[in-house]
């Protein structure tokens, strides 16, 4: 039985991860500046470290890293059992020691050059979005007891927060796009395993498929959920601030009030194509699942 689509899927995953790695390397300084700007705003709002951090993020990051390691190790075992022809340009190593060394190097390559950049960015994106949500929540809570004379200062602070969200989107939107594209491949592997079990008949192949699937979609859901919470919290903050400004404008109009009413609510996007919100999570999962089913139905195995 031939498996024509599986090597193509592996090649696609390799290409996407390499693009993601290159994009991440070129944006390291920008991402560092985003973290510093977020730190400065957090200091101005006097947000403590205990309030910024969330234990579930640390637990998820550790679990996700373990799943990626399991995927890499299981893939190395598969290479050792099946031989090295698949990734050494049809060259077979017969010596067990050389085969074990090649399998180890293959696993190490998957961890360092492929899984590590994806996982590192996923953790960074989730933590950054969580901290931005804390900033927005703290700012919104402060608006409830704001004095009449402090509204102009609040508008200036909110403008800085909006600019930072736009800066975050500029630095992370393309990387979110490559991460989303990457998730289509584990979905295809999972569907193939369910519909065509003989394509991944070995126990090590089954372990690698499901560990990659759980890790990649755990990553996607964590990133998308944290990004959507930034959008939702920003909308609530904008509505509350507009209500305060409207009340102030009825009494003493200010020059800052007029441009504020036309301010767009900044949100995180996927390469400026679609906003990261709750509907995005379900729509992208449904779209990927549908196309994977269609692609599997087009296969003509001999």
Image (cartoon, rainbow, N blue to C red):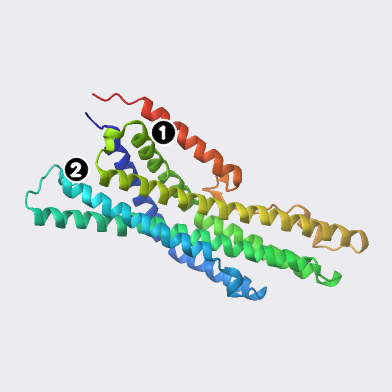
Residue 231 point in image, percent of width and height: 64, 53
Residue found at x 31% / y 60%:
112
Mark 1 crowd level (few <14, some 14–19, many ≥20, 10 Å Cα): many
Residue 32 point in image, percent of width and height: 48, 68
Residue 65 point in image, percent of width and height: 38, 59
Say left or right for 286 vs 255. Answer: left
Say left or right for 253 vs 110. Answer: right
Q: Residue furthest front?
A: 203
Residue 246 point in image, percent of width and height: 85, 57
Say left or right for 81 vs 269. Answer: left
Q: Quadrant of residue 133?
A: bottom right
Residue found at x 64% / y 73%:
47
Residue 277 drawn above or below residue 128: above
**SS at circle 2:** loop
In primary-sequence order, the first of circles 1 and 2 is 2
281 or 100: which is nearer to us? 100
Residue found at x 56% / y 68%:
53
**Circle count:** 2
For mark 2, what is the residue? 86
Does residue 257 appear in the picture of this structure?
Answer: yes
**SS at circle 1:** helix
Does residue 22 appear in the picture of this structure?
Answer: no
Residue 292 — which label?
A: 1
Say left or right for 108 vs 256. Answer: left
6 or 14: which is nearer to us? 6
Residue 92 drawn above or below residue 226: above
Q: Gap in Å between the C-alphas at discs 1 and 2?
A: 23 Å
CB-based contact (under 8 Å), mark 1 and mark 2: no
């Amino acid at each position: 039985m031939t498996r024509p689509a599986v090597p193509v899927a592996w090649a696609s995953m390799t290409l996407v991860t390499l693009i993601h790695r290159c994009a991440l390397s070129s944006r390291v300084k920008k991402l560092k500046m985003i973290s510093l700007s977020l730190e400065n705003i957090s200091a101005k709002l006097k947000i403590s470290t205990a309030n910024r951090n969330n234990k579930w993020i640390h637990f998820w990051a550790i679990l996700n890293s373990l799943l990626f390691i399991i995927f890499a190790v299981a893939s190395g075992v598969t290479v050792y059992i099946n031989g090295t022809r698949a990734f050494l340009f049809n060259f077979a190593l017969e010596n067990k020691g050389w085969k074990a060394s090649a399998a180890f190097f293959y696993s190490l390559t998957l961890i360092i050059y492929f899984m590590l950049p994806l996982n590192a960015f996923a953790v960074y994106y989730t933590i950054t979005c969580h901290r931005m949500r804390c900033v927005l929540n703290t700012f919104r809570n402060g608006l409830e007891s704001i004095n009449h004379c402090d509204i102009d200062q609040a508008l200036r602070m909110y403008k800085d927060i909006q600019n930072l969200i736009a800066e975050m989107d500029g630095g992370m939107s393309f990387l979110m796009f490559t991460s989303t594209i990457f998730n289509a491949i584990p979905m295809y592997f999972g569907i193939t395993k369910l519909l065509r079990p003989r394509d991944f008949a070995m126990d090590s192949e089954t372990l690698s498929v499901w560990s990659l699937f759980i890790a990649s979609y755990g990553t996607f859901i964590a990133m998308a959920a944290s990004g959507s919470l930034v959008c939702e919290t920003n909308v609530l903050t904008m509505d509350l601030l507009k209500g305060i400004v409207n009340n102030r404008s009825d009494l003493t109009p200010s020059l800052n009030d007029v441009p504020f009413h036309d301010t767009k609510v900044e949100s995180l996007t996927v390469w400026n194509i679609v906003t990261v919100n709750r509907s995005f999570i379900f729509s992208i999962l449904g779209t990927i699942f549908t196309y994977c089913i269609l692609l599997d139905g087009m296969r003509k195995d001999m």
